[in-house]
Amino acid sequence: MAKGMRRKLPIFIITFLLMITAGGVFFVVLMLRPERKLSGTWKCEQAVENEALSLGREWLDSARLGNEVDLGGLGDANVKLTLELNKDDSWKMYMDEAAYEQEKTKAYQSLAKGLRSLVILRAAELGATVSDEQAEEAIIKACGISSYEYAMQNGPVLMPEGSSISTKYNLQGRYSAGKGKISRDGMEDMSFLVDDKLLVLANDTESWTWRRAGEETPEAVDLFGFLKPMNVYAAGNNHNILENLTMVVDGGRSCNIKTLHYDYRNNRFVSMRDVAAALSGTDKQFELSVTADTITITGGKAYGAVGGEGDLFPRTQREPDEEDPLYNTGVLKFNTMEYNGATVKYYTFIGSNTAGNKDAYINLTDLAMMMDLDMNIQDGKLMVNTQGHYYLDIAALKQEGFFDEVNSALVGDVTTGEIFVSSMEDTPVPIASTTKLMTYLCIMDAVSAGEISLDDIATVSKKGETLSRSIDGVIKIDEGQQIPVDQLLKGMLLPSSNECALTLAEHVAGSEEAFVERMNTKAALLGISEGTLFINCHGLPEYPDNTATSKIQNHMTARSMFKLVQHILKTYPQIKELTSSKSFYTEAMSREVRNTNPLLYNLPDCFGLKTGTTIKSGACLVSGLNVKDAEGNLHEVVAMEFGAEDSTVRVSMSQELLLYGRDCVLNGCSSNGITSVSLSTVEDLVTEALKYL
């Protein structure tokens, strides 16, 4: 028995040791599973999709010397997020709302500092030395509020309201993870990589980098090496995605074209020097001059290279706002350019190239329209046919979602009544200040009926003065001020003055309420009442008089707006002379009113008609183009879009639609395959503030 036990003992010991070893290996493997490292609290900062610096820059640039003001303290905003992955498979994500509001306050403080700096610069121009405190006092005396309050009320929307983004980032639910994938309720599945301090989540469109709470992110972390072989192209709030694009000219010569992707992948801005060098010697060649704030283009002349043309970007991804030491791409600005001796206006970047020479980047579509270039992307290459012309394949683009970034759109010929293409044309949408086209019609009807005349003198009411001094005021007017009707019309249609619209409505009907009744009655008489509702004469949102807090706005359908414009152009064609004018001087208001529609510069035969913007409506534009057909007959092509996310989209899409409509007239095509404050407001503030120094 003892002898038998001695023989079995080694086997028992070996078996026991193997079991322990196997269990240990299992335990180690279990501990090393990356899913086990997911649980815990993670922190990150996510960029909010806005362009605070460029918006603030554009706002100040509307005033003289505004481009010399330093806005270095104003940057794109981030939201601080916390992600809790719990061991019971529940998860929760939430934003630090207090920190977000602090960042918003800092943004407007930077803008207010820019206003004070502008006062100081203008005072120095007059020979006076002014401190920051003195500039603040002058602003308060000029407008009755501090520079910070003024920037908050009248400046651009630098950051979204916290309540509008909290629903995006305040989420919770259940999660599961395995094989490098994490699934969370309410979120798309994402790949993950994790260690003790860092968690990287990524899918085809975005990546998130989280650090464990209490830990600092390591200084040297190759996140994109981490993610390889994934290709991650994030939608950001800057031009952090770079591309070395190949341009093929007339099916032969290939050239390198440096390209920025602004905000979203494939929203391309191309180097103008690279394009000029690539097109040199062709029928589309052009001479180019770029300075810090000026771009001059002369077609038909050979381009003289300055160095850096065709150089490649040394890398194709960078952090938002990060510049490479070998080049500087600048910030997006709404620049005035000279093209063949004429003034045009486009959004561009002005920076320097790899050789240190000034370069400009322009949206690829804008370049094609401006220079009438036949350009398209094929197999990842930019194909250019210098013998062709700009052409928009609207049917194909519509299928690809061309109209997805607006609420509704339409282009047609009001002369014949034909609609060439449209999207959501029968859906009622907020129309913002394009409302003023109906206001104009009702005023002209009153003139035609002999109720008033264009020479009548209208008296500004207390309500009009109050509106002019509110956040939605455009032209400062005073109660009792006497202003001729024709000057009020100019103020209403060019800089979109809400107080001018209100004064006209009260002069015609005695009250705004009575005038609005006329507007809705006129809509019914024109057969466009379905989906149409006017609550005021200017298009601003209003709160109804009840316990529920909600905004209501004027709304129409694109088809109804087309019919309205058709009637106006037929009945009162003189509106074209008014809305195609770039500026007027109004004696009674002692100011020049300017038309801020850039299409008047970019399309020589454009005749307006009306812009509009509120937070809810988005950026809207109703525009027209005179086109003569082969027989010499005049056609009035009208395009409209409602609900663009910004003025860049509004202007670009409107120009594309008008050019498409022009092609339809000339060549035929298949059918349908907080109102912004006038840019001169900053100038008015500074001019007034200087009086108190």
Image (spheres, helix red, strand yellow):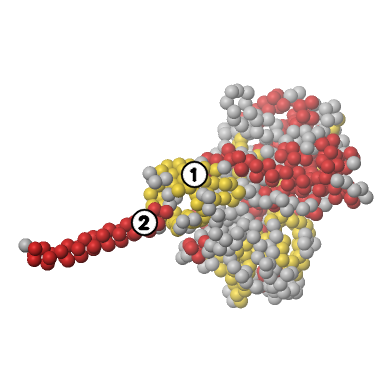
Split into 4 quadrants, where in the image is the N terminus? bottom left
Identify the mark nearer the N-term, 2 or 1.
Answer: 2
Q: Position of residue 345 (x, y in %)?
A: 73, 55
**Residue type, label 2:** Met
Residue 20 drawn at (x, y percent): 26, 60
Please state if 396 lies on the left or on the right of 121 as rendered: left
Residue under label 2: 31
Whether tag 2 and tag 1 are in contact, CB under 8 A, the answer is no
| Position of 383 relative to 520 (above/below) | below
Image quadrant of residue 542?
Answer: top right
Q: Position of residue 371 (x, y in %)?
A: 69, 63
Q: Is residue 496 above or below residue 46?
A: above
Name the amino acid type tagged 1: Met
Residue in the foreground of this view, choosing between 521 and 224: 224
Quick one: which residue is furthest to the front in this view? 2
Q: Quadrant of the C terminus?
A: top right
Taking the image as drawn, is residue 385 in sight?
A: no
- The structure residue drawn at horizontal position 45% and vertical position 48%, both measured from the top left corner, is 40
Tell whether 194 sits left or right of 331.
left
Q: What residue is shown with label 1?
A: 93
Q: Quadrant of residue 431?
A: top right
**Which label sits in the foreground, 2 or 1?**
2
Question: Mark 2: few, some, or many residues within 10 Å (few <14, many ≥20)?
Answer: few
Element type at marker 1?
strand
The residue depicted at 48 percent of the width and 63 percent of the height is 226
Q: CA distance from mark 2 to mark 1?
A: 26 Å
- Which secondary structure lies at badge 2? helix
